Amino acid sequence: MKERYDVTVIGAGPAGLLAAKALAQNGFDVAVLERKQDPAAITRACGQSLLPPNEYFFGDIFHYNERDKRFCFSVSGLSFPYTGPVKSLYNWHMFSPGMKKMQFGCGEEKKTAPIALSYDKDVLIKDLLRDIACDHVDVCAGTEYTDMQFGPGTIVVKAGEKAFQSSFVIAADGTNSRVVQKLGYNSNRRHIANLYVQSCFIKGFKPPHDNAIITAVTFVDEKPVYLFLLPRAEGDEWNFIILTLEAGVDLTAAYDRITKDARFAAWFKAAKKTKEFAAIEYIYSPIQRPFRNNVLIVGDAGACQELECLGAMLTGWKGGLAIAAALKEQELGIMPRAIAQYEDWWLNTYIKQYDYQDYLSIFGIAYMFSKPEVIDYVFGLMGDESFPATFNPYRAVGLLGGRLQSLMPRIMQERPDILQVLAGTMSLFPSDIMGQTLKK
Ligand SMILES: Cc1cc2nc3c(=O)[nH]c(=O)nc-3n(C[C@H](O)[C@H](O)[C@H](O)COP(=O)(O)OP(=O)(O)OC[C@H]3O[C@@H](n4cnc5c(N)ncnc54)[C@H](O)[C@@H]3O)c2cc1C
């Protein structure tokens, strides 16, 4: 460990590791601080599916290069090794409380492109750590950022008793970022809700569809709960995620109730948990300008809820390159522009193209349609025909909204009472509906 680095990166998730890679490949000294003792041991709930391989996302398009065992991003030129398993997922089946179904994608047999790639996140992080070790990055595991002090040309990052000095810091400490809080960003962001998550890998799950993502909206004690089921990349294990915005839901009890519920019991009859995870996310509106006091915020730390791994990786990579260029600008004494360009990229690629209100709509369904029977009716109407293949939440929301709009005349005829409910909620922002309902 050195006394001084060019850049300190806080957080060894996908965003932090790619930021470190970009800097180290440009010849800069980088320390990555990670609070976990083993950065590759994933403890936080994650679907472990990379999306979307069938469309542009954050200005890039990615694929898995089987021959060289690398994930490749064709626009930015980023590529990194991944030696773990990959499974292609083709369809997304979404169930209502009464098991009415909507489907995105119409089947593997049609040889459509996959909508997501299931992968092993432990292996991905392990491979990235090995990759950046070759570029001489110092990864300090078991090192939790606690505070930051700013002096002329130097930032001192404190991690308990340890101190790291550098010219720039990249904050990649994920959702609920302590650095973001320290820098005062949260006072100008809107806190919308909290998301509570428990998940597990399960064996013996009998899926209603293979190689597909299955999600469901259900209610536990009248409170909305969302289920996500994704096949693991290898073998017959599945990743089962239970999420709620309601602090009062006991997610452990919910697992027992849901797996025994008549609607799902056949799927879970022989299911056995093999590994458990959890997460809490404080959902804020996104940061608009992610650079302050020589600290650049990348990945989930600056986003609303989540950027997805792809978004986190691309912001980490681009952010790392921007700081590398800024260091070079300083060295050469030329007019700085790299960081302003990164902020423009963030604004134009994320903030302007991926409306966080759309992202929230996925978790707002139960609040926008208010009652299980309304959700059933809407799913029943909209599920007549499958939607184009996507697991991109922003695109899916656009497709759903478009179809709902086109069905309005029919709803007006069949169920004017439901139209009234929809008219009341569709003119509001999802964040307002969620905020108001959760406050009650
Ligand atoms: C339930 C759930 C399901 C998801 N499913 C998917 C999915 O299917 N596909 C997908 O692409 N994305 C999914 N995501 C989102 C994905 O997990 C994130 O977008 C991605 O991991 C963000 O990467 P990151 O590097 O920004 O943050 P993180 O992955 O959160 O990494 C942050 C790192 O910083 C470390 N850290 C935090 N605080 C400190 C500190 N004070 N000091 C030092 N280190 C610190 C953490 O330990 C962690 O290693 C899901 C998320 C959740 C919660």
Image (cartoon, rainbow, N blue to C red):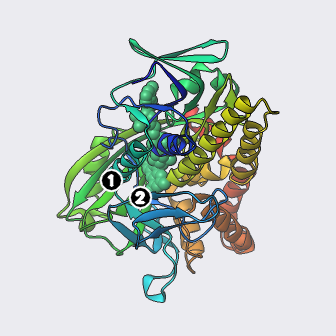
- Is residue 402 rendered to the left or right of residue 43? right
Q: Secondary structure at mark 2?
A: strand
Q: Which residue is mark 2?
A: 81
Give the number of callouts.
2
Q: Which residue is mark 1?
A: 123
Secondary structure of the residue carrying tag 1 is: helix
Amino acid type, label 2: Pro
The structure residue drawn at horizontal position 28% and vertical position 42%, both measured from the top left corner, is 252
Where residue 317 appears, as percent x and y from the top left, is: 57, 47
Depth order, front residue of 54/378:
54
Q: Which quadrant does ligand 1 occupy?
A: top left
User: Which corner quadrant of the image does residue 214 belong to?
Assistant: bottom left
361 vs 139: above or below: below
Percent position of residue 381, x then y: 59, 74
Tell me the kind of residue under disc 1: Val
Closer to viewer: mark 2 or mark 1: 2
The residue at the point 62 percent across, 60 percent down is: 57
> Which residue appears at 38% of the width and 45% of the height?
129
